[in-house]
Amino acid sequence: CLSTFANVAASQTDSVLVAAVANRVIVVVLFRLHAGASATSVTFNSKGAGAGTAISEAFACGANGGRADGFVPIGHFETSEGEALTVTTGSGSTTGIGIKYVLVKPTP
């Protein structure tokens, strides 16, 4: 597994967590979210050209709260082939985001 983290400001659209990798799908197998002093939401996206496409529901995080969804070997969600993994945050506060992921070559 690979891992990354970011502190993403409020009201961001398509903030990159993992850059696109040619001929690969990014599969998120574990994630953590933690909002700052104000409640906010986080949606994970698959982003090619143009606006990203939501690949998760909006995860609502209360002020100074969050969630941690444990390891799932088949993944919680995945990008489209060759697209970046991004997040969109709601208004509120900066949200800390940590993920573990794998790069998978799609089967033909």
Image: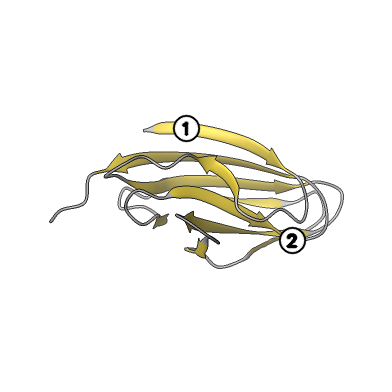
Identify the residue position indicated by label 2 in the image.
90
**Lateral position of residue 106 relative to residue 48, left or right:** left
Q: Amino acid at mark 1?
A: Ser
> Which one is in front, 22 or 93?
22
Quadrant of the snapshot with the N terminus = top left
Give the number of the disc on residue 3.
Answer: 1
Q: Residue at x 42, y 42 (%)?
A: 20
**Lateral position of residue 13 relative to residue 64, left or right:** left
Real-space CA distance between mark 2 and mark 1, rounded to the nearest whole angstrom: 23 Å
Can I make out residue 66 in this image?
A: yes
Give how far across and how far down residue 14 sits, in percent: 60, 53
In this view, the residue farthest toward the left is: 108
Quadrant of the snapshot with the C terminus = bottom left
Quadrant assignment, res 32? top right
Q: Amino acid at mark 2?
A: Gly
In this view, the residue farthest toward the front is: 49
> Which one is in front, 38 or 6?
6
